[in-house]
Image (cartoon, rainbow, N blue to C red):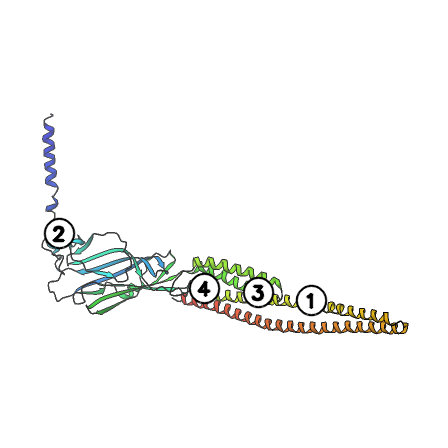
Amino acid sequence: MACLWPCILVAASGILAIDTPHPRNSVLHHLTKQLLQKYHKEVRPVRNWTKATTVYLDLFVHAVLDVDTQNQKLKTSIWYREVWVDEFLSWNSSMFDEIREISLPLSAIWAPDIIINEFVDIGRSPDLAYVYVNSSGTIKNSKPIQVVSACSLETYAFPFDIQNCSLTFNSILHTVEDVDLAFLRSREEIKRDKKAFLNDSEWELISLPSTYSILQSSAGDFAQIQFNVVIRRRPLVYVVNLLIPSIFLMLVDLGSFYLPLNCRVRIVFKTSVLVGYTVFRVNMSNEVPRSAGSIPLIGVFFTVCMAFLVLSLSKSILLVKFLHNEQRSGQEQPLLCLRGDTDADGPRMDARAQRATVTESPIFQEHQAQSGTLKEVWFQLQSISNYLRTQDQVDQQDVEWLSLLYRFDRLLFRSYLVMLGLYIITLCSLWVLWSGL
């Protein structure tokens, strides 16, 4: 019995070998071998060399990964498709068990040298080594790519900015006589197709318009297709965190103009508002995109309003300093006048004392005493009159300065109102234009 087991195993293995076809004898293997046996991937696959190979392109935008305004770069995830006809990779499906489509390695066949002109970095994409080929010789090459492209990014209308970045596809070496380009789908369908786009990011895809053109150069005429990726920013977060607080801060600064001009509390209040402006400016610099080519409009308005605040604060400081100096000079004047009268009276008393020692008549002494008292009263009245006249001149100068500064303050207030109105109207207009797309 033990001797029968090896015979049974040999017989079973023979039966399995007969029932399982060898890969070399399969129809698919035979078809693949026949297609690639005499195939030359170095040569453009046309039987008539004067006939151009038309490459049909299609593009789907999957997501906007990063918008780098400082370095003027856009990073997108796209799904890219190429379709062309290879005249040496066609077969009769009825002769090969009705096989109508197979996969072939991309490295074994001819492929068009299509690139993206705006590439500024190595595109990260999974290595898809195979393409689909049908019985008519039509080849379909599909692959996802993370494209890092150069783009002119404008931040003037932030956070209601709309960016338009182009992806231009063309051949590196083949002119339009050898390799021509065309659209796989209609241009209107490509423009409106947003099914593959992820809408949970900061950016929203508006449209994907495309154009076909011929690039003329010294090396020849090259066919190119340009896809324009039109995207817009979702501004709700920035409206809540930047625009509304900035408007509130400007309104608080605007209310400080209702404080009296010569009030020192106004300086303290405006200084506190200036500190608030500075802190908000530092926080805003982390949120607002930075670009060497353009400055966001919100930054321009904020800087102008901050300049108005500094100008008004400087005017208030000068006014308080001026009034303080005038008050000090007004307080010192009567002291100087009184001190001068006291010094002047001293010699007169000494002179009367000397004359009293010479004259001994009581009538003369009484007459001299009355005349000295009248002179002293006259000098005091004259000193008070001079002081009041000087004080009236100082008050008149104060009134003139206050009137001038009050007009200047009203001018600043109206300018501030105009600036704030322009700021709000501009933001509303940008919001309407953003919503209209």
Measured in 3D between alpha carbons, the distance from the residue under mark 4 to the one under mark 2, in whole angstroms, is: 64 Å
Mark 4 residue type: Gly
Q: Secondary structure at mark 2?
A: helix
Q: Nearer the viewer, mark 4 or mark 2?
A: 4
Disc marking residue 255 = 3
Residue at the image position 45 percent from the left and 68 percent from the top? 426
Mark 1 residue type: Glu
- Viewed as shown, does residue 321 lie left or right of 241? right
Residue at the image position 50 percent from the left and 63 percent from the top? 247
Measured in 3D between alpha carbons, the distance from the residue under mark 2 to the one under mark 3, in whole angstroms, is: 83 Å
Residue at the extreme right of the image, as rendered: 362
Disc marking residue 332 = 1
> Quarter of the image holding residue 109?
bottom left
- Determine whether label 1 and label 4 are within 8 Å by CB: no
Disc 1 crowd rating (10 Å Cα; few below 14, some 14-19, many 20+) is few
Disc 4 crowd rating (10 Å Cα; few below 14, some 14-19, many 20+) is some
Identify residue for label 4: 299
Q: Nearer the viewer, mark 1 or mark 4?
A: 1
Q: Which numbered disc, 4 or 2, marks the residue that appears first in the sequence?
A: 2
> Quarter of the image holding residue 406?
bottom right
Quadrant of image for the N terminus:
top left
Identify residue for label 2: 32
